[in-house]
Amino acid sequence: MTTTPEATGSLSGVGTGATGTDLTVVVLLVVLLIAKEIATSVPGPRARLVGRILDVGLAPLALVFAGIVALRLLRAF
């Protein structure tokens, strides 16, 4: 008797709660925002440079976060 494993993918969570991608974006956004605040609070040119570099990563993540929030609001109403 042979058995075949059933596929359980990430699609099982779609539509219910937060997906893995949503959580990853939110956690990464929070971590980068904290790192930027720490970098900008330290005096010196190197810290300013790190703060500017983190801005490059924060802009697209903020847009994705806004999209996630908009989609969640559209689904709720």
Image: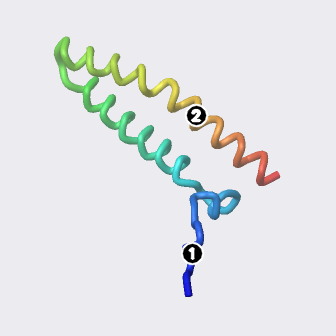
State how far apart marks 2 and 1 are (Cα). 38 Å
Q: Position of residue 32 (x, y in %)?
A: 37, 34
Residue drawn at x 70%, y 58% as measured from the top left:
15
Could you tell me how many numbered marks the image carries?
Answer: 2
Amino acid type of disc 1? Thr
Taking 16 as reference, is 72 above or below it? above
Front-most of 1 and 27? 1
Q: In this image, 68 relative to 39: left or right?
A: right
Image quadrant where residue 76 sits: bottom right
* Rendered residue at 58%/66% (across/down): 7
Between 49 and 4, the one nearer to me in the picture:
4
- In the rendered image, residue 17, in percent from the top left (x then y), is placed at 63, 60
What amino acid type is highlighted by mark number 2?
A: Val
The residue carrying mark 2 is: 64
Report which residue position mark 1 lands on: 4
Q: Is residue 48 above or below residue 7?
A: above
Element type at mark 1: loop
Quick one: label 2 or label 1, which is nearer the N terminus?
1
In the image: residue 76, left or right of residue 2: right
Asked if residue 44 lies left or right of residue 28, the reply is left
Which image quarter: residue 34? top left
